[in-house]
Amino acid sequence: MIWIREDIGPQRPVDVVIFDVDGVLIDDTVSYYAAVKATVSYVVSELHHIPLAQAAVTDADIVAFKAAGGFNDDWDLAYALSGLIISGAARDAAELARIAGESASRGRGWVQQTCFPDLDLDYARVRQIGVEHYWGADRLREYLGRRPEYYAGAGFVRLERSLIPPDYFERLWGVGVRRFGIITGRDEVELRSAFATLGLAHAHPFDFILDAGTLRKPDPLALVRAFEALEPASALYLGDTGDGLRLVLHDRQSPQVTVPCLAAMIPKPSQAEIFRQAGADVLLDSADELPATLNRIAAGRRCPADGEG
């Protein structure tokens, strides 16, 4: 599927592409999603002794909160889900989906204050449990120099895979893109692991990298800094979450930014219409469709409906 909004008008050729990482360049549904689910299960059942069946969350629950925005940090999400289940504020998937929608990009702080303000749940502890499940004991020592406290098994990071082919950046250069950037919710160490998965451990094509230790989406200053470094004539941001879309939409409202930037999103099956209604310019099934999409935009061709691309 390649869907391009009909009313985006004539565009300058896109010469800079800025990527999110998870869900765009790296498949994180088998790593971070699994780590979030395992963390919630551990916190709810092992630490709070609630039956395991009540501790289960699904990929659909995670997608609902990601689409709502405010949960680009997976440990924020694990904390919110754990608190909702432990407190009894959400007893089933329907209640989780309702709270996700009501959170409307306000994130962990809003969920905690609204749904379980008096619950004694240590965020640092939940985060540590999540980090240990993600890395596993051996890579926790290798990448972070730590010994595990809660989980001594293999990490879900081992399951990550690249979502782009080896010649991907060459193909983008071939359609006129000259520089690449990254704005990610990963920290520096997690990003180093992602580059290894992408086969870019020794050299990568990114001229600008902004990780979670600097600014968090959807702060429009993230794009301001990217544009200052990359100097685009016209840019495109490729992401897969509500926070990523809001990053571009907030940028358009900022007087500091004069660079046109398209919002291209890779939706999960249930998100396509949500992203259309929210203001996305482009929807793709995968990052691999981007070179063809840029050609279509440059030629002024649109695909108004799913399946026509």
Image (cartoon, rainbow, N blue to C red):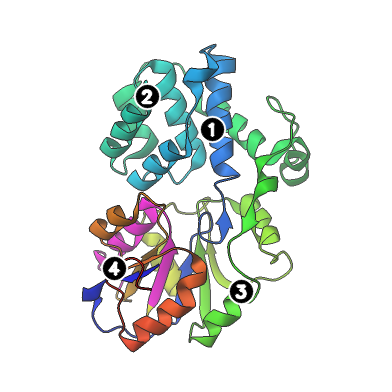
Mark 4 or mark 2: which is in front? 4
Label 1: state its secondary structure: helix
State yes or no: residue 253 in magenta: yes
Mark 3 or mark 1: which is in front? 1
Mark 2 or mark 3: which is in front? 2
Q: Is the residue under label 1 in contact with that under label 3 (CB below 8 Å)?
A: no
Mark 4 or mark 3: which is in front? 4
Q: Any mark on residue 92, and which?
A: 2
Q: Using the rendered image of the protein, determine whether residue 232 is visible from the camera's viewpoint.
A: no
Precedes in sequence: disc 4 or disc 3 = 3
Q: Any mark on residue 37, and which?
A: 1
Mark 1 or mark 4: which is in front? 4
Dot 1: within a 10 Å radius of its alpha carbon, few (fewer than 14), some, or many (20 or more) residues? Answer: many
State yes or no: residue 15 in magenta: no
Precedes in sequence: disc 1 or disc 4 = 1
Q: Which residues are magenta?
A: 235-257
Q: Is the residue under label 1 in contact with that under label 2 (CB below 8 Å)?
A: no
| Quadrant, the C terminus | bottom left
Q: Amino acid at mark 1?
A: Lys
Precedes in sequence: disc 2 or disc 1 = 1
Location of mark 4 (residue): 305
Dot 2: within a 10 Å radius of its alpha carbon, few (fewer than 14), some, or many (20 or more) residues? Answer: some
Q: Amino acid at mark 3?
A: Pro
Q: Label 2 to label 3, Cα distance in Å?
A: 44 Å
Q: Is the residue under label 4 in contact with that under label 1 (CB below 8 Å)?
A: no
